[in-house]
Amino acid sequence: MEDKQKLLLGITNCLLGSYIRIREIHWNTRNQATHNLTNTLLPEIIDYIDAIIELMSGVIERPGYDILKPIIPSTKDLKPILQALVTKIETCQEMLTEPAFRGINKTLDDLIADLNRWYYLADNF
């Protein structure tokens, strides 16, 4: 199960790094639609991070301390960040096939749906 915890912490750190980069996009954009979209999705990303860690704690164990090491994307464009997150999460889900991970996979499915929705909205700017 330790490998599954590392996998989920990796996704969490990708989400946290993406949150940081999207926050910077939010602060620096001159496009009102981008500003509004990022304003909407930022708190939702934090909620997903929290949900993933809490569900993981119920299935595996509490994560401990010093586990947050944000992986900040190099791009400064919103769409590639969202697209990369979908790819990483789908890859993660392929490794979480045990019944104990159904709740986590449901949360990851919801996150993918939201990421795809935000990608679509970002496409319309």
Image (tube, rainbow, N blue to C red):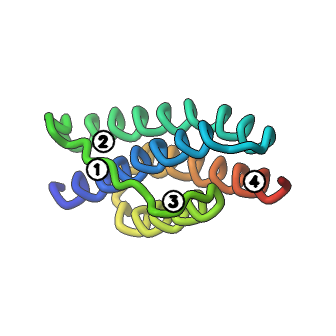
Residue drawn at point x = 42 percent, y = 38 percent? 49
Q: Is residue 65 above or below residue 99?
A: above
Label 4 vs 3, first from the N-terminus:
3
Mark 2: amino acid: Met
Q: CA distance from mark 1 to mark 2?
A: 9 Å
Label 2 vs 3, first from the N-terminus:
2
Q: Is residue 28 above or below residue 7?
A: above
Residue drawn at point x = 36 percent, y = 61 percent? 96
Q: Which mark is residue 34?
A: none
Residue 86 image point, x, y percent: 55, 62
Q: Are marks 4 and 3 in contact (CB under 8 Å)?
A: no
Label 1 vs 3, first from the N-terminus:
1
Residue 73 image point, x, y percent: 44, 59
Q: CA distance from mark 4 to mark 3?
A: 15 Å
Image quarter of residue 34: top right
Q: CA distance from mark 1 to mark 3?
A: 14 Å
Q: Nearer the viewer, mark 4 or mark 1?
A: 4
Q: Can you identify the residue that label 1 sits on?
A: 9
Label 2 vs 4, first from the N-terminus:
2
Q: Can you identify the residue that label 4 sits on?
A: 122
How packed mark 2 is, by other alpha carbons closer than 10 Å (few <14, some 14-19, many 20 or more), is many
Q: Is residue 75 above or below residue 64?
A: below
For this view, does 113 lie left or right of residue 53? right
Label 4 vs 1, first from the N-terminus:
1
Residue 100 visible: no
Q: Can you identify the residue that label 2 sits on?
A: 56
For this view, does 8 lie left or right of residue 6? right
Q: Which mark is residue 85?
A: 3
Residue drawn at point x = 60 percent, y = 37 percent? 27
Mark 1: amino acid: Leu
